[in-house]
Amino acid sequence: MFGIAYSTNDPAGAGIAKVLRDKLGLSESYVCENSETCFQGGNIVLAGFREDVIYFDFLDERMPSEVETYIVLSRHSSEAGVKSYTVHHTGNFGGDAQYGGSPGELGISSPRVSWLILRALYDSWRAGNRAEYEVSYEATHHGPTSLSKPLVFVEIGSSIDEWRDPFNHHVIASSIVKLLGTKPDDCKPVIGIGGGHYPRKHTELALKENVCYGHIIPKYALQYLSPETLDKMMSRSDVDIKGIVVEKKGTRAEHRSLIEEYASKRGLEVRYV
């Protein structure tokens, strides 16, 4: 079962949720605790909460225990104002938790679910002829980080105009509906190293090949790269990670050496893009 959550104060999340309710014919339900809205149908529960999404550490307590994976519908903010449809996992690589979660903690990733959503978003983006938008993974960032089940964020960026756009709500909702109706696909679960906050080369690889990403640590956070960090990226996943993909440009030699030594000891493939 999927637990789909959003903030009722977020026009992007609330807009996507409304379209989902209509598309899936969900019925009002009382299985959610302390929620503003709660709907159920088939294998999903859809709940709205008044809190901001980065503080959704309470989902284990407020969503039904039958939920296996959480999907959070959200707005995305960008100083550059990039129009986007993005997918990412949650976590804090360093000692700062300014945007929710706990310092140095990663949420549980779901490489396959995030990959299927990314691909569905890409298909919807192409069909909708929205060339001004980008479809991308984002690097792992912000909270919540302490949930006991996998968590995937799906977001619309990057300003109030995009958050309120009904077409964008339909793009995201259609991608979720496609996920729900998709038969299991084989993909190779990996973790990603390097690249920017929107790691283009990792995204391109996932769209071209059956390679699905768990956590991605961007170039700007490589100061925190260590065997312990890699352990967390590997273990905080709902499937076994089979390889490490590194964006070579911008990843320093000492970091590449650390990664290769780590992978060699564990029989993991390292791939450079």
Image: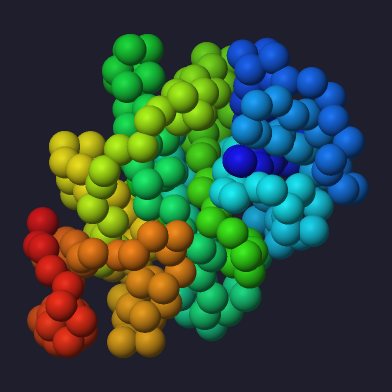
Q: Is residue 109 above or below residue 13?
A: below
Q: Is residue 23 above or below residue 138?
A: above
Residue at left 73%, top 58%?
A: 60
Relative to residue 65, is residue 132 drawn left or right?
A: left
Residue at left 38%, top 30%?
A: 183
Residue 140, by quadrant, is bottom left
Q: Is residue 201 above or below residue 231?
A: above
Give whichever of 129, 227 is nearer the camera. Answer: 227
Q: How is the image coloured?
A: rainbow
Q: Is residue 104 visible?
A: yes
Relative to residue 212, is residue 138 drawn left or right?
A: right
Residue 125, by quadrant, is top left
Relative to residue 206, is residue 147 drawn left or right?
A: right
Residue 265 in percent (x, y) is at 17, 87
Relative to residue 220, is residue 16 drawn left or right?
A: right
Residue 93, by quadrant, is bottom left
Q: Is residue 194 visible?
A: no
Residue at left 69%, top 14%?
A: 25
Give whichever of 66, 20 is nearer the camera. Answer: 66
Residue 176 in percent (x, y) is at 51, 29
Give whichever of 215, 180 is nearer the camera. Answer: 180
Residue 5 in percent (x, y) is at 68, 41
- The N terminus lies in which quarter of the figure? top right
Give whichever of 13, 61 is nearer the camera. Answer: 61
Residue 273 in percent (x, y) is at 10, 56
Residue at left 87%, top 48%?
A: 33
Total marks shown come to 0
Q: Is residue 136 above or below residue 183?
A: below
